[in-house]
Image: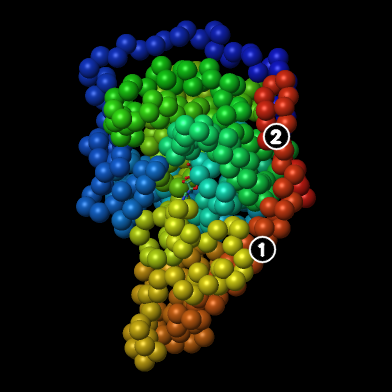
């Protein structure tokens, strides 16, 4: 996938479309705000509690997440057994992978918007593209961040489709950046983190010829016409009620959501997506990112040609949160190094973290454990194995033994040992891939500065 044809990126697909910009009047605006807030429209999602004890938004996840309630609140759908069967059939037809990804079978990717539309397109032999992203807030990514990328890699393998990956260095600067009267600001720091994180992302092994990874600071100019269209289409009331902006928020924060929305439209990638403006878009991510795309879907028709198969609405596949070591509430955080396993951790660090910090649902004494068994729902080592132990039979054996307190995996120590081996091997493979992608370079062209994918594993 290339990005160096300067002429083609300035072909405006919408030249012939009438610019129908709706006049907002009160009723319409109330409806818009309600739609953007999800099915219930009670305006409580941004930074506040949904129900009694959970907070889920793009910047905070805390409390015990009730996924059923969350999906209802956001107005997304659960992946039903029928939809899963249909997806399975569609995937088998491609002949590229043999079975559904364990994260689909195990309900880790559990919720969606318009996934049946993606199945329908594939049944008709029509193409789509994948879009996902990362906000580079720390040099090392943790296992939770990796989930959507590993899954996206599998989707790309299964469907053989183009992929765009957005690195929101701008977002992280706006939310976490600092200004010092001596040294100035630290925008460059976030651009550097974007490059570092890109290496970890590339190490997942995407198809180099079909993957475009970009930093907003570098590429925004190409998306700017679509960003403008989104700014024009979304009212401040909608943005404020969805994201919770306040008078004291810097104005960049209010402007940013449009920048995360813009890659949902193929016309933001005229060269990488080769002017295929009717391509549908599928976005794999954790469910915390839904607020961006809920708004996107409401205004999508304004950014695509009339015969776009989904009227421009991106389809979404949501995963649950990979829990922190200390317990199954909230999500893993980069700012607490003991809550997470990072892609840079050594085998010894992994072992130490799991042994010392992973919350156990087992009993205090061996005697008690042998009688009562462990509570798998709250047991972090077991929960982590449901994400990363691929072998279904072994996982079942661990569940049976551990919950009964008998057999090979009767106690926490045994289960932790198994998890440590699984993670050490996963991280080792990833670190080898990261080394292979270390020659990621920022290269100027007449079109844009871009991240170019290099490296043995990345090229696979
Ligand atoms: P960021 O960097 O917070 O997270 C990157 C991706 O990882 C998901 N994620 C998790 N998934 C499972 N368990 C966790 N504990 C966990 N923590 C984070 C996020 O949902 C995300 O998919 N603003 C975005 C960057 C972005 C983006 C996108 C994400 C730009 N465009 C399109 C998804 C789709 C961000 O800061 O993600």
Asked if the residue at label 2 sits under 8 Å from ligand 1, the reply is: no
Residue 151 % position (x, y): 57, 51
The kind of secondary structure element at disc 1 is helix
Q: Where is residue 155 in the image (x, y as percent from the top left)?
A: 60, 47
In the rendering, which numbered label is found on residue 197?
A: none
The quadrant of the rendering that contains the N terminus is: top right
Which of the pair 155/349 is nearer the observer? 349
Q: How many numbered tags mark residues here? A: 2
User: Which residue position holds label 1?
Assistant: 428
Image-quadrant location for residue 364: bottom left
The disc at residue 442 is 2
Q: Tell me: residue 385, above or below residue 263.
A: below
Q: Residue at x 50, y 33 (%)?
A: 182
Q: Nearer the viewer, residue 184 or 337?
A: 184
Bin the neighbour count of mark 2 within 10 Å (Cα to Cα): few under 14, some 14-19, many 20 and up: some
Residue at 44 percent across and 21 percent down: it is 230
Find residue 259 and report its horizontal and vertical position in percent.
49, 28
The image quarter containing residue 294 is: top left
Mark 1 and mark 2 in contact (Cβ < 8 Å)?
A: no
């Amino acid at each position: 996938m290339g990005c160096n044809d300067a002429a083609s990126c300035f072909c405006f697909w919408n030249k012939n479309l009438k610019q129908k910009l709706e006049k907002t009047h009160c009723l319409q605006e109330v409806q818009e705000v309600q739609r953007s807030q999800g099915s219930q429209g009670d305006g409580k999602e941004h930074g506040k509690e949904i129900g009694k004890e959970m907070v889920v938004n793009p910047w905070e996840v805390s409390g015990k997440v009730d996924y059923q309630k969350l999906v209802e609140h956001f107005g997304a759908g659960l992946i039903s057994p029928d939809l899963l069967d249909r997806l399975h059939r569609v995937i088998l037809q491609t002949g590229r992978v043999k079975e559904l990804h364990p994260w689909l079978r195990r309900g880790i990717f559990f919720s969606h918007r318009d996934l049946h539309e993606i199945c329908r397109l594939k049944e008709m032999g029509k193409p789509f593209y994948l879009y996902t992203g990362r906000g580079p807030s720390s040099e090392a990514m943790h296992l939770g961040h990796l989930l959507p990328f590993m899954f996206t890699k599998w989707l790309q393998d299964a469907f053989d489709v183009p992929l765009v990956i957005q690195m929101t260095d701008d977002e992280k600067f706006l939310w976490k950046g600092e200004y010092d009267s001596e040294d100035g600001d630290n925008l460059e720091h976030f651009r550097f983190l974007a490059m570092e994180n890109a290496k970890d992302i590339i190490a997942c092994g995407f198809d180099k010829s079909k993957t475009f990874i970009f930093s907003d600071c570098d590429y925004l100019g190409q998306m700017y016409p679509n960003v403008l269209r989104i700014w024009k289409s979304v009212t401040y009331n909608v943005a404020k009620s969805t994201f919770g902006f306040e008078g004291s928020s810097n104005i960049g924060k209010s402007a940013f959501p449009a920048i995360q929305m813009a890659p949902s439209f193929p016309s933001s990638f005229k060269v990488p997506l080769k002017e295929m403006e009717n391509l549908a878009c599928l976005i794999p991510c954790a469910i915390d990112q839904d607020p961006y795309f809920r708004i996107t879907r409401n205004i999508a028709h304004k950014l695509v040609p009339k015969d776009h198969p989904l009227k421009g609405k991106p389809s979404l596949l949501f995963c649950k949160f990979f829990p922190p070591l200390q317990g199954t509430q909230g999500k893993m955080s980069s700012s607490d190094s003991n809550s997470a396993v990072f892609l840079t951790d050594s085998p010894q660090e992994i072992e130490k973290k799991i042994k010392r910090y992973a919350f156990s649902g087992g009993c205090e004494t061996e005697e008690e454990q042998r009688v009562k068994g462990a509570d798998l729902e709250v047991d972090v080592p077991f929960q982590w194995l449901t994400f990363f132990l691929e072998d279904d039979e072994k996982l079942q054996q661990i569940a049976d033994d551990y919950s009964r307190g008998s057999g090979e995996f009767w106690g926490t120590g045994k289960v932790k040992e198994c998890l440590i081996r699984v993670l050490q091997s996963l991280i080792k493979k990833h670190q080898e891939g990261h080394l292979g992608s270390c020659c990621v370079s920022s290269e100027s062209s007449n079109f844009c500065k871009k991240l170019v994918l290099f490296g043995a594993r990345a090229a696979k």
